[in-house]
Image (cartoon, rainbow, N blue to C red):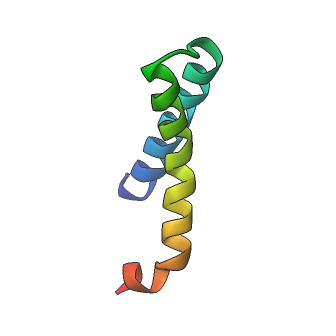
Amino acid sequence: MQIFMWPIVLGVLTMIGLVMTLLLETGWFELVSISALALPVIVMIYTYYFRDVIRH
């Protein structure tokens, strides 16, 4: 379960961001949806560039 926890969390956040983008396009909902969609990209970039630091 430890291996699959973070991918599941990122998948759920992405799904929430996509649904909020499609349904609620005003105010704080837009900021939350953009943040939820940007978070997996930020995590991938971080793990790509800092993978040596994470392994040790």
47 left or right of 2?
A: right
Residue toward you, 8 or 34: 34
As drawn, 54 above or below 41: below
Which quadrant holds the C terminus?
bottom left
**Residue 45 % position (x, y):** 56, 66
Residue at image location 49% in from the left, 38% down from the top: 36
Q: Residue furthest right?
A: 22
Q: Residue 40: image x %, image y %?
A: 53, 50
Name the residue rendered at 54%, 36% in the picture.
34
Percent coordinates x, y for residue 1 in the rendering: 38, 51
Q: Residue at x 40, y 49 (%)?
A: 5
Residue for point 49% across, 59% down: 43
Vertically, is 11 above or below 33? Answer: below
Q: Nearer the viewer, residue 22 or 1?
A: 22
- Residue 49 lies, in percent from the top left, at 53, 78
Is residue 51 placed above or below 3 in the rendered structure? below
What is the total number of numbered labels drawn onto the structure image?
0
